[in-house]
Image (cartoon, rainbow, N blue to C red):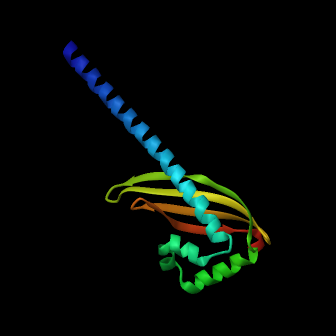
Amino acid sequence: MIKKILMGLGIAVLVLVAVAAVGVFLARQGERLDASSKAYANRTIPLIVSAWSEQALVQNAPELLHAASKPDFDRYFAAFAKLGPLVHYDGAKGQSNITVLAGKGRIVTADYVAHAKFAHGSAEIDLGLIREQGHWKIDAFRVNSPSLL
């Protein structure tokens, strides 16, 4: 009887140690993903919005071209350009997310919001990222500004 109790306790301790190890691993991995996704966002957002470069967006988000037509892109960037050149960028705030789906495996995404001031108004830039083959790519890009209404 005591042998069974000790064996059960031993298994329970092993399970707890394994769960703790996985938790520490995921926390450290999450910190690295947060740091790399934030660095990517803070490098890429100013690259796109400083002169409203459609090309910079497409280079970092080739899949977006499939979701929107070239005339749509041209129209959006013509509207964004009304804000003028970038005057001040406050930096991106957000975090990465790890999701595990049956049949798809691990999906790593990140969501960021950045505030920026332009020559003709302010804007909030929403950036969605996805990590594929070890690299971040833009999955969503939105510009919200009362100056564009």
The percent position of residue 79, horizontal first and vertical second, equals: 70, 79
Let me know if residue 149 appears in the view.
no
Which of the image's four quarters has the C terminus?
A: bottom right
In screen coordinates, is 37 left or right of 22? right
When the figure is inspected, residue 37 is found, relative to residue 66, above or below; the finding is: above
In screen coordinates, is 28 left or right of 12? right
Question: Residue 29 falls in which quadrant of the image?
Answer: top left
Let me know if residue 90 appears in the view.
yes
When the figure is inspected, residue 103 is found, relative to residue 141, above or below; the finding is: above
Residue at horizontal 62 percent and vertical 63 percent from the top: 126
The percent position of residue 138, horizontal first and vertical second, equals: 52, 66
Question: Residue 115 falls in which quadrant of the image?
Answer: bottom right
* Residue furthest to the top: 2
Residue at horizontal 68 percent and vertical 70 percent from the top: 50
In screen coordinates, is 136 left or right of 39? left
In screen coordinates, is 58 left or right of 90? left
* Residue furthest to the right: 120
Number of numbered discs on residues? 0
